Amino acid sequence: MEQIKDIVSEVIAAMAAGRPTVQNKIRKIWGKAFDPKTLKHTAIVGLQKGKLIVHVDSPAWLFQMSLKKRDVLEKLKAEIPELSHIHFKIGKVK
């Protein structure tokens, strides 16, 4: 007999496979919105209460992305209406 934790894990995995999460959708749009150089210096960290948290790897990139913030937010909101803000901060970029 299967344990309940295994059944729940299978159901959750099946549900997740059926529709992309909001974060995956954001990553996909983010990847299309920027050139490879920009993508190399940024990393999406998470989404909290409609606010997208993005790490940049230097103060120069923080400034650069701050200049693009309004345009980026408009592109993302067109696909993800619940997104209300983007917060860029210096952090680890993989």
Image (cartoon, grey):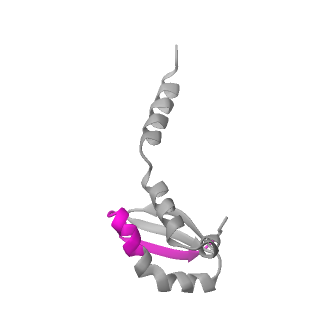
Farthest residue in the left direction? 81
Segment tinted magenta in the rendering: 73-91
Residue in view at x 57 percent, y 82 percent: 62
Which of the image's four quarters has the C terminus? bottom right
In the depicted structure, whether residue 78 falls above or below residue 1: below
Question: Is 13 placed above or below 70 here?
Answer: above
Q: Is residue 37 above or below residue 30?
A: below
> Residue 4: where, in percent of width, then height?
48, 24
Where residue 65 appears, as percent x and y from the top left, is 53, 81
> Which residue is pictured at 65% across the width and 68% down the height?
93
Is 30 magenta? The answer is: no
Image: 72 above or below 25: below
> In the image, residue 86 lies at what x, y percent?
44, 73
Q: Nearer the viewer, residue 87 or 32?
A: 32
**Residue 85 part of the magenta segment:** yes
Q: Nearer the viewer, residue 57 or 67?
A: 67
**Marker count (numbered):** 0
Q: Residue at x 40, y 80 (%)?
A: 70
| Residue 40 screen position, x and y as percent | 65, 71
Residue positioned 58% across, 71% down in the render: 55
Q: Is residue 68 left or right of residue 40?
A: left
Residue nearest the observer in this picture, 58 or 80: 80
Q: In which quarter of the view is residue 78 placed?
A: bottom left
Looking at this rendering, what residue extends furthest in the top direction? 1
Q: Is residue 90 left or right of residue 21?
A: right
